[in-house]
Image (cartoon, grey):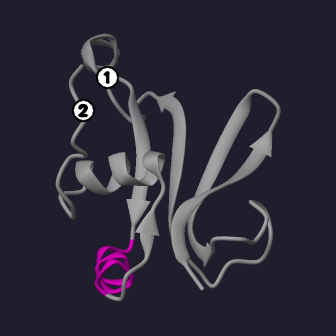
Amino acid sequence: MVVRIRLSRFGNKHQPFYNIVVAQARSARDSKPLEVIGTFNPVPQRPTGLSDEEARTARAYKDISLDRSRAKYWLGVGAQPSDGVWRLLHLAGLIEAKKVPSN
């Protein structure tokens, strides 16, 4: 059976929040996963605890937390990341960028 690393959506309408999960490929998106290895908040957040001057110049960021050792383990045993997770793992430096065929 194929194991995939993919996103599982949580949060309210217009406020998405995702768990990065390891699950069987044929299971539903929000079913119980084998393991939760991280979280991803795609809504840009402003840094807190800054002075007014710093707050105006600070850039918003998307929060990603990932258990790198568990992600490496699952990739090592053959888990296949989805396209969205592939991008997140590339940002974390765990895998190479996906090759896009040129037309």
In the picture, measured across the screen, residue 19 lies left or right of residue 31, that is left
Where is residue 40? Give x, y as percent.
Answer: 51, 50
Instruction: Give the amino acid at mark 1.
Output: Ser
Dot 2, how many residues are within 10 Å of its Cα: few (below 14), some (14-19), or many (20+)? few
Where is residue 102? Give x, y as percent.
Answer: 21, 24
Instruction: Give the amino acid at mark 2.
Output: Pro
- For the point 20% across and 47% down, the residue is 97
Q: Identify the magenta region.
A: 67-76
Secondary structure state at the residue bearing disc 2: loop
In the picture, measured across the screen, residue 64 lies left or right of residue 4, that is left
- C-alpha span from label 2 to label 1: 46 Å
On screen, residue 16 above or below 34: above
Dot 1, how many residues are within 10 Å of its Cα: few (below 14), some (14-19), or many (20+)? few
**Residue lying farthest front?**
103
In-front residue for pair 84/69 = 84
Which numbered disc, 2 or 1, marks the residue closer to the eye?
Answer: 2
As drawn, the label of residue 51 is 1
- For the point 71% across and 33% down, the residue is 15
Residue, disc 2: 101
Q: Is residue 89 magenta?
A: no
- For the point 32% across and 10% down, the residue is 56
